[in-house]
Image (cartoon, rainbow, N blue to C red):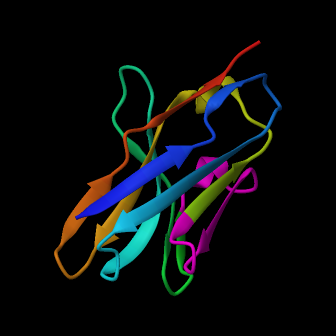
Amino acid sequence: QVQLVESGGGLVQPGGSLRLSCAASGIIFNIYRMGWYRQAPGKQRELVATMTTGGSTNVKDSVKGRFTISRDNAKNTVYLQMISLKPEDTAVYYCNAYSQYYEYNYWGQGTQVTVSS
């Protein structure tokens, strides 16, 4: 069993910054990939950025240059540094962890990011 605890969401003005954190706990030895997805109202959930234990990344094209994913394997924590935020970035951001061994996706509860004047 894996638990994911997210933090760092909130309200920010356009052009502002936020840093999201997600800490994994439980039976985590089999976690291969961690990262972030987001879902805006009325839209499908989409990938934002992920990183494997080996450091390989997969990042949504529209956030490249603004969002940076990092991972601290020793702390079992993944981060998303977001700068130059736009209203279009408003969404619930979900932490994700993938177990290749179990072929199973774990999800956090989600953290709200709102970009508004």
Which quadrant of the rendered structure holds the N terminus?
bottom left
Q: Give the percent coordinates (x, y) of residue 98.
A: 31, 68
In the image, residue 27 sits, relative to residue 96, either above or below, namely below
Question: Relative to 103, is 60 on the left or the right?
Answer: right
Query: Looking at the picture, does residue 92 appear above or below residue 108?
Result: above
| Residue positioned 80% across, 39% down in the render | 84
* Residue positioned most to the top: 117
Q: Residue at x 63, y 54 (%)?
A: 80
- x, y percentage for residue 69? 63, 62
Is 38 drawn above or below residue 21 in the view shown? Answer: above
Residue at image location 57% in from the left, 82% down from the top: 55
Q: Is residue 63 magenta?
A: yes
As drawn, is 37 to the left or to the right of 15?
left
Range of magenta residues = 59-77
Whether residue 47 is visible here, answered yes or no, is no
Q: Where is residue 3 shown, x and y percent of the image? A: 33, 57
